[in-house]
Amino acid sequence: MATLSRKLRTKRWAISKHQLLALLGGTGLFIFGLSGLLHIVMVTWGPQQVVMMPPMAPLSLEIAKPLQKTLADAGIDKAAAIKVVAGPQGSVLQVTPSQMAARRYFSLETGAEIEGGDEAQAVFLARHYSGLDAPVKATTFLTDFTPNYPWVNRLLPVYRVDFETADNRSMYVYTETNASAGMTNDFKRAVQTGFRWFHTWDWLPRDVEWGRVLLIALFVGSLLGLAITGALMLITIRRKTPIRGSMRWHQMAGYALALPIMMFTSSGLYHLITSAATPPERVLSLQSSLDVAEMRFPLAQEWTAMTKGLPVSALSLVTSPTGSLLYRLGLAAPRGAAPLTPEALRDTRFEGRPMTGPAVYVDAETGQPWDGGDAAMAAHLGARFTGSDAEPEASLVTRFGPLYDFRNKRLPVWQLSYGEPVNATLWVDTDTGALVDKLPNSQQPERWSFSLIHKWNFLRPLGRNGQNIVIAAIVLASVGLMAGIGLNTYLKRRKRFSVDRPKAQQV
């Protein structure tokens, strides 16, 4: 008897709260469900780059001017990064004076500085990734995020290269690693604006951030409550005669869609509250200044003998754990088959491919091999960026995943997982000694939740298109069979109540 009473109380409570939340929760499903589909529209039908891997150029220093002489003639005694990259005319020396400054470029053969080199490099990269040969309308050096290049892109500074095309296509490129940072056009900008306005509500001023969080939490929380009470109604209500019409569809859809709606809303709320409590910060940091005075070893003169039999594809300078300067000779990574179809290109962009393979280190002063390798260099970088001598759990990351995703646009990196006292996971790039990302252990559950429960990345085996089709079908079914029918029933009930109430008062 007590069990029946408890079940009856649960049923009555669920019915009353379901009716109470109907208008707000149903409206929330319309707003956030349909606006969420804009993200799928944006990545599926937005402009796609035609090449995934960065440009390559033969790396040979046999006839190069000594690098230390090139830097000395340019008056450079310290820099944040020094490396050889592929440029419009082949391999060139790239020097990054400081993290947010434009890069400088020098001819390897003559040592002459290339005027306007960073802007020219940006245009070269934009054409490489976009496949466009249209005239360039403008180039803009961005040191801060914008509505069309939001903070989720992570990389700064970047160039925006605008092409003279019918759809006003633009390419964002990050010259420090020769990486594509994004591509957009009129269509994508319009869809992205709709997503910002209706899904993230970025139109609200930043000084009333609490208002944005509360409003979204009100709508999404009501939708979550609506799904929970609806599920309770499905469990506790047993009808002697089945309901008919649209409400029958509403009930049947509830069995299939209640759980997905709870997954989307609970993970969305978790993400919203976590992001509000710990606002995102810029993590990407280059290494401390390199002292180029230590570059005494004649690398160019010894290049042929030193690299004999080695598939060297990259050259950069880094500091060792003892502070000495090292040449890092990156070896070529297995390339595999190039993605050719638009779907394969999208999948590769979200899964990632390593730019280089393992590396050999040579002392820049003596020319002697450094006994450590990439793993030792990664551990050294972890100690530098954490200030701790704790031993991390280290692993090489060659594919993007839930914790380190495609937004970082850099592979391979080393993942360093720390316990006490750091309690965080770091991702470092041994190619330039950079801290790429950092995630406190306390925030890892939210990142897993957002990736797997909100974005449904557990469907990745279906491919990006398959994943998007499943999500879109669930969202459209939820909007039509849950919100549409539910709100229609709610409004009919309110209309009937408003008609019956005056009659009752007359009696």
Image: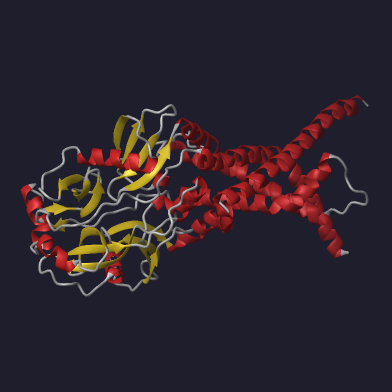
Report the residue at 47% width, 40% height from top.
209
Quadrant assignment, res 370: bottom left
In which quadrant is the C terminus drawn?
top right
The one of 183 and 403 positioned closer to us in this rendering: 183
Residue 177 placement, left or right of 115 = right
> Is residue 71 visible to the viewer in this orientation of the structure?
yes
The one of 409 and 441 positioned closer to us in this rendering: 409
Q: Is residue 404 above or below residue 47?
A: below
Residue 455 image offset from top left, x and y in percent:
56, 51
Q: Is residue 95 above or below residue 360?
A: above
Report the residue at 63% width, 40% height from top.
28
> Is residue 145 visible to the viewer in this orientation of the structure?
no
Residue 38 image offset from top left, x and y in percent:
56, 39
Report the residue at 10% width, 69% height from top.
366
Q: Is residue 9 above or below residue 136?
A: below
The one of 188 and 45 positioned closer to us in this rendering: 45
Residue 332 image offset from top left, x and y in percent:
31, 62
Instruction: Count the marks.
Output: 0
Residue 55 placement, left or right of 244 = left
In which quadrant is the N terminus drawn?
bottom right
Residue 111 placement, left or right of 186 = left
Q: How is the image coloured?
A: secondary structure
Report the residue at 80% width, 44% height from top.
249
Quadrant assignment, res 355: bottom left
Residue 69 image offset from top left, x and y in percent:
7, 54
